[in-house]
Image (spheres, grey):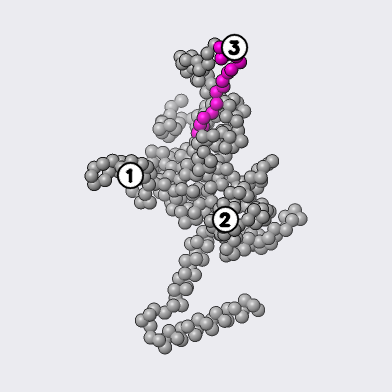
């Protein structure tokens, strides 16, 4: 079968279905066979006396990487799409870290190499943008492979981060591959969110107004209310893509976005109304939640609407009601009188 390599991936292949089948066949047995061949030429870590005493060892998974690569038909389209996606999420505070890794040595004026890893916010020819999500000792990242393919990969550095034993066997191998594939899929979905159309009026109404689901009343998520907006921004965050959303992780996000006094009871209340509204769903037999496609879409829409339309618009309106200092005093007095009258009229209408 003919194919063209893309670093450690496939740029093109004659028969994609066969290629997927071959990749899917890789299992723990293949890895164990490779390790046994290596151990045949390496010293045994246990002595004969150790063996007689009943000591033994088993292979374990120190690190597992699961990746998904989408090859674009033109490199310029790949870079344009990825950089647009990064820019689309920067003001939402969604990535835990957006790093543009400089692919060159940094040298100061004295021609001494400066140690360390550097990042910049300027996208240039020598910079490779990445989106990274860290969860305990594991992480997921998205970047461009050779400038033409979008690579999303989850690196599991500790299987117990996901409740899976480290022992290398068929069951644990399959569980870890499932974790990696599911994380990659959620990462891609979150990265591409916001590129679809606007939600319909009925959907918007079901979010902002109280509703009833299976006999349970779900309070509305009122747009503009500070706690609600912080809650929606938390749902739109990337940080829960890997490990999921819990009462503890929600409290940590809300402490930053809304109030440091956000309590465990408040988090339980908010998780309940998010679940009833279909924004999240519980992972079976756990207290962890996953954001649904509907929840991710609506949280992203409302957060963008607030940060890109409402807040800038109100700021501009506030600037309009403050006449420049050079304005003659009689005109400034008349403008303030008009502003006060308009405010009084609005308050009267709202009360009525």
Question: Which element is circle 2 on?
Answer: helix
Q: Quick one: label 1 or label 3, which is nearer the N terminus?
A: 3
Residues 84 and 63: in front is 63
Residue position for label 1: 126
Q: Is residue 300 above or below residue 159?
A: below
Question: Which element is circle 1 on?
Answer: loop
Q: Is residue 28 left or right of residue 97?
A: right
User: How busy is the neighbourhood of tag 3: few (under 14 within 10 Å), some, or many (20 plus)?
Assistant: few
User: How busy is the neighbourhood of tag 1: few (under 14 within 10 Å), some, or many (20 plus)?
Assistant: few
Marks 1 and 2 sit apart, C-alpha to C-alpha, by: 37 Å
Residue at left offset 42%, top offset 79%: 323
Q: Quick one: label 1 or label 2, which is nearer the N terminus?
A: 1
Q: Could one spot residue 130 in this view of the protein? A: yes
Question: Where residue 251 appears, x then y in whole percent?
Answer: 59, 53
> Looking at the rendering, which quadrant does residue 320 occupy?
bottom left
> Looking at the rendering, which quadrant does residue 276 occupy?
bottom right
Q: Do the residues labelled 1 and 2 touch (CB within 8 Å)?
A: no
Residue position for label 3: 52
Residue at left offset 61%, top offset 80%: 348
> Looking at the rendering, which quadrant does residue 257 occupy?
bottom right
Residue position for label 2: 254
Q: Is residue 241 left or right of residue 74?
A: right
Residue at left offset 45%, top offset 71%: 316
Residue at left offset 56%, top offset 14%: 50
Q: What is the residue that sits farthest to the right in this orientation?
A: 215
Q: Is residue 204 left or right of residue 148?
A: right
Q: Quick one: label 3 or label 2, which is nearer the N terminus?
A: 3
The rendered magenta stretch, by its main secondary structure, is classed as loop
Question: Where residue 53 appears, x then y in whole percent?
Answer: 60, 14
Residue span colored magenta: 49-66
Marks 1 and 3 sit apart, C-alpha to C-alpha, by: 59 Å
């Amino acid at each position: 079968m003919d194919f063209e390599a893309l670093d450690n991936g496939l740029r093109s292949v004659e028969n994609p279905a066969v290629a997927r089948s071959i990749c899917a066949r890789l299992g723990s047995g293949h890895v164990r066979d490779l390790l046994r061949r290596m151990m045949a030429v390496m010293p045994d870590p246990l002595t004969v006396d150790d063996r007689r005493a009943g000591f033994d060892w088993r292979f374990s998974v120190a690190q597992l990487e699961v990746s998904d690569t989408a090859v674009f038909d033109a490199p310029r389209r790949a870079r344009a799409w990825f950089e647009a996606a990064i820019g689309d999420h920067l003001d939402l505070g969604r990535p835990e870290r957006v790093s543009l890794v400089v692919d060159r040595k940094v040298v100061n004026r004295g021609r001494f190499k400066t140690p360390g890893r550097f990042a910049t916010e300027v996208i240039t020819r020598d910079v490779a943008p990445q989106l990274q999500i860290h969860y305990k000792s594991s992480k997921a990242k998205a970047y461009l492979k050779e400038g033409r393919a979008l690579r999303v990969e989850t690196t599991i550095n500790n299987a117990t981060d996901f409740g899976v034993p480290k022992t290398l066997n068929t069951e644990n191998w399959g569980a870890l591959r499932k974790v990696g594939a599911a994380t990659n899929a959620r990462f891609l979905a979150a990265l591409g969110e916001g590129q679809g159309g606007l939600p319909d009026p009925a959907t918007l109404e079901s979010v902002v107004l109280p509703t009833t689901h299976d006999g349970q009343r779900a309070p509305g998520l009122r747009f503009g209310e500070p706690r609600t907006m912080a809650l929606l921004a938390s749902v739109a965050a990337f940080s829960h893509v890997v490990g999921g959303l819990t009462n503890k992780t929600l409290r940590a996000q809300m402490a930053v976005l809304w109030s440091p006094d956000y309590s465990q009871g408040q988090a339980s209340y908010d998780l309940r109304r998010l679940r009833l509204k279909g924004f999240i769903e519980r992972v079976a037999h756990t207290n962890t939640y996953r954001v649904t496609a509907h929840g991710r879409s609506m949280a992203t829409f409302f957060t963008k609407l607030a940060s890109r339309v409402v807040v800038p618009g109100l700021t501009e309106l506030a600037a309009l009601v403050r006449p420049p200092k050079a304005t003659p005093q009689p005109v400034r007095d008349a403008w303030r009188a008009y502003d006060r009258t308009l405010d009084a009229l609005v308050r009267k209408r709202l009360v009525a």
